[in-house]
Image (cartoon, rainbow, N blue to C red):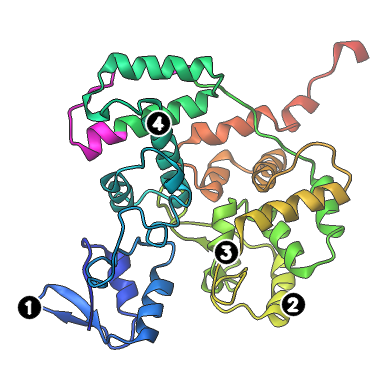
């Protein structure tokens, strides 16, 4: 049998129950299924992108290196070239705390850079002054404020969460938070991008990103069962911050999606690369970039630009800020209020003094 041992988690338990003839063993305190090649492959498919699978116990006769790239390829494909790798306990804590894939990658990359900086020193012995010197070094290297904040967060995570030390670095000064306005394009420009895209799948991707205000990761993780055509809503499950929400389903987009489904026949996800597997993140970025060039838009347009444009255009047409906050999945209204600084409806009422 294949035993499945994990920390108590309702999502994982629900997924295990979808496996064929999965049963609970009170003797071993774990779920198990029959040991077949088909079932083993099914386990990896079921938990792909949801849980990290440690096979060390299962493949006990196989030589498993600590930095085996097959085991941890999602996190560190180029680790063999580095002097110091992120501790396994660090990765495990990130996974247990249900950090998103992108956050895990960012934390690991930033923490390994920190470890490389102190290559000849045991990091557990570093003091608060050492951390400050590293932050000054990042300033000298002209690193962005957001990267410096990420570096502080990933360092604090190691000492305070992984090692369980008290809050040692509360006095480490953070850079002042920059307030950057979101990049927005006009509704006419968005429509031009969609109109000039002939590929039906690509057109649906552009339309959904804009009409539902989706993040790129949310689009990639969108499943066929998340499209509620009866209520004209899209169910966004476990998005940023592990939050669920509903957002709008456009009638125009639904018509396109039905045509796309008949032509492409996706199995699980709305947009798939290989059958049953999510579409590539890089491919979505290329689609958006290509469409913006075809539409003759000179400024840089990313998938997130379409999300910003969705929110701004809703505000400009008089939609209440609280509704926009719910559609975007923002925890705080202050995050949504940034769009009031780029919406043009408030500026139209102001008469320019040169034109008086």
Quadrant of the frame with the N terminus: bottom left
Q: Which residue is mark 3?
A: 233
The answer to whether the residues at label 1 and label 4 have Cβ atoms under 8 Å apart is: no
Q: Residues within 10 Å of mark 3 (few under 14, many from 20)?
A: some
Closer to the eye: label 2 or 3 = 2
Whether residue 321 sits left or right of residue 116 in the image: it is right
Dot 1 or dot 4, earlier in sequence: 1
Query: Which mark is drawn over residue 259?
Result: 2
Numbered label attached to residue 27:
1
Apparent side of residue 85 relative to residue 193 in the rendered image (left or right): left
Nearer the N terminus, badge 1 or badge 3?
1
Q: Residue at x 76, y 63 (%)?
A: 203
**Rendering quarter of residue 270:** bottom right
152 horizontally vs 122: left or right: right
Q: Nearer the viewer, mark 2 or mark 1?
A: 1
Instruction: Residue at 40%, 42% (x, y): give it.
Output: 108
Task: In the displayed orientation, state which residue is furthest to the right.
Answer: 355
- Assign a secondary structure to mark 3: strand
**Segment tinted magenta in the rendering:** 157-175
Q: Earlier in the sequence, mark 2 or mark 1?
A: 1
Image quarter of the C terminus: top right
**Helix, strand, or loop for circle 2?**
helix
Task: Determine which of the numbered discs, if any, sits on residue 116 in the image.
Answer: 4
Label 1 crowd bin: few (<14), some (14–19), many (20+), radius 10 Å = few
Q: Position of residue 237 (x, y in %)?
A: 46, 60
């Amino acid at each position: 049998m294949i035993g499945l041992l994990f920390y108590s988690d309702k999502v994982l338990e629900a997924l295990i129950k979808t496996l064929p003839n999965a049963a609970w063993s009170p003797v071993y305190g774990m779920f198990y299924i029959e040991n077949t090649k088909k079932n083993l492959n099914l386990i990896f498919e079921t938990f792909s992108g949801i849980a990290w699978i440690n096979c060390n116990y299962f493949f006990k006769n196989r030589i498993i290196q600590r930095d085996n790239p097959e085991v941890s390829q999602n996190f560190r494909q180029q680790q063999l070239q580095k002097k110091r790798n992120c501790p396994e306990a660090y990765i495990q804590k990130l996974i247990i705390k249900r950090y998103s894939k992108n956050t895990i990658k960012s934390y690991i990359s930033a923490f390994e850079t920190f470890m490389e900086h102190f290559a000849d020193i045991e990091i557990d012995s570093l003091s608060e002054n050492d951390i400050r010197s590293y932050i000054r070094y990042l300033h000298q290297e002209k690193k962005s404020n957001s990267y410096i904040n990420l570096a502080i967060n990933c360092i604090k995570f190691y000492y305070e969460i992984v090692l369980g030390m008290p809050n040692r670095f509360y006095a480490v000064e953070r850079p002042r938070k920059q307030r950057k306005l979101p990049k927005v394009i006009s509704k006419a420009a968005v429509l031009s991008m969609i109109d000039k895209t002939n590929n039906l799948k690509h057109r649906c991707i552009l339309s959904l990103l804009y009409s539902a205000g989706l993040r790129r990761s949310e689009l990639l993780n969108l499943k066929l069962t998340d499209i509620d055509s009866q209520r004209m809503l899209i169910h966004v499950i476990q998005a940023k911050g592990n939050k669920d929400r509903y957002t709008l389903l456009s009638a125009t987009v639904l018509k396109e999606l039905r045509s796309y489904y008949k032509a492409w026949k996706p199995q699980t996800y709305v947009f798939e690369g290989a059958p049953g597997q999510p579409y590539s993140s890089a491919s979505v970025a290329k689609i958006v970039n290509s469409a913006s060039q075809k539409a003759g838009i000179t400024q840089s347009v990313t998938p997130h630009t379409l999300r910003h444009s969705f929110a701004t255009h809703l505000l400009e047409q008089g939609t209440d800020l609280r509704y926009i906050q719910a559609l975007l999945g923002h925890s705080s209204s202050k995050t949504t209020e940034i769009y009031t600084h780029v919406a043009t409806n408030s500026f139209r009422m102001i008469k320019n003094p040169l034109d008086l």
